[in-house]
Amino acid sequence: MLGEIWTQLFPLAGTGMESILTLVFIILIFFYSALKVVREYERLVVFRLGHLVGSRGPGLVLLIPVIDRFVRVSLRVITLDVPTQEVITRDNVTCSVNAVVYYRVIDPNNAIVNVENYRDATGQLAQTTLRSVAGQAELDDLLAERDKLNQQIQKILDDATDPWGIKVTSVEIKDVVVPEGLQKAISRQAAAERERRAIVIQAEGEKQASQKLAEAAEILTRQPGGLFMRLLRAIPEIAGQQGNIVAFPLPMELRHLLDAYTQKSQEKQE
C-alpha cells in the first residue's frame, strides 16, 4: 500500500528509494511510540504485558511499543470541593456543611493498582467522613471548634487513603448553614452573653475602684492634714461645675482644734 502511494506520488523513484522511505517511516513510528516525555510533576505507571513494571520519570522515558502500556499520574496537589452535606448534629440540629480537601499522590503505583479511580474514591470518602464527624459534634463545636474538626477529618481521610498512595495535606470546613429560626436564637444568645460580660466587667471595675478608694482613705486618715490637702485639691473641681449651692465640708483637724479649745474654756470657767 505504501509502495503504491509512493509510486503514484513519485513515478520516477525506484524500488530502492521506496524501501528506504518505508524503513524510515517505520523507525519514526517506533520512536514516537517508544519515547515519552514526562514532566517534573508527572510519573508514568508502566505495565508490560499486564504486569506492573513501576513508575518512570521525569524526563525522557523509553517504552517498548505494543508490549508496554502506561498511565500518566500527576503528583501535584489536588483541590477537592466537597459538596454541601445535610447533617444532624449530636444536639439534634439540622444544618448544611461543606468543605474543601487538599491531597496529592505520593505513590503512583498504588494509586493506579489498588483503587480503580482514586479521584472519585477520595471524593466519596471525604463526603461520608464529613457527615460522620459533623454528626458526632454539637452545633457549638461546628461553629467555634472548626480547627479541631478539620484535624479529625484529615486524620481519618489520611489513614483511609494511605493504601491508595494518597496523602491528605489539609481539610477546611468552609460554611455551616443553620436554619433561619435558629440563627435568631443564636443572635439573642450572643447578645445576652455580651450584656452579661459587660455587667460583670462593670461590677469588677467598681469593686477595684472601691478597694482603691478605701486604701486611699486609710492613707489620708493616718497622715495629719491629709484630708485637708485632698479637700483643697477638690475645691477647683467643685468650683468648675454649674450650680448655686456648693457644699464645703470642714476638715477633721479643724474639728479636733475646736473640741480642744472648747474643753480648755470649760476648764478655765470651772
Image: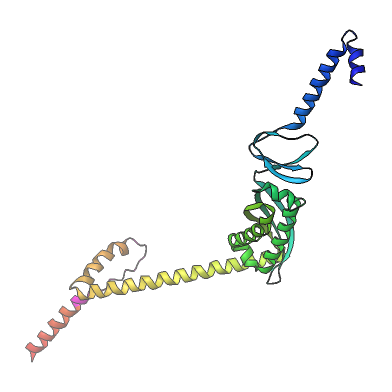
Specify the color scheme: rainbow
Q: Residue at x 9, y 89 (%)?
A: 267
Residue 110 shown in magenta? no
Q: Position of residue 33 (x, y in %)?
A: 77, 31
In the image, residue 44 sits, relative to residue 261, either above or below, namely above
Q: Position of residue 114 (x, y in %)?
A: 73, 53
Residue 22 occupies quadrant? top right
- Residue at the extreme front of the image, as rendered: 16
In the image, residue 13 sits, relative to residue 134, either above or below, namely above
Foreground pick, 266 / 166: 166
**How many numbered markers are drawn?**
0
Q: Quadrant of the N terminus?
A: top right
Q: Position of residue 258 (x, y in %)?
A: 16, 80
Position of 174 compared to 247: left or right? right
Position of 245 compared to 89: left or right? left
Q: Residue at x 13, y 86 (%)?
A: 263
Magenta region, residue range: 240-254
- Residue at the extreme top of the image, as rendered: 12
Residue 247 occupies quadrant? bottom left
Q: Residue at x 66, y 48 (%)?
A: 107
Main secondary-structure element of the magenta-colored stretch? loop
Q: Residue at x 81, y 36 (%)?
A: 66
Residue 249 shown in magenta? yes
Please say whether residue 32 is visible from this viewpoint.
yes
In the image, residue 35 sits, relative to residue 167, either above or below, namely above
Foreground pick, 63 / 189: 63
Foreground pick, 167 / 259: 167
Q: Quadrant of the C terminus?
A: bottom left
Position of 257 compared to 165: left or right? left
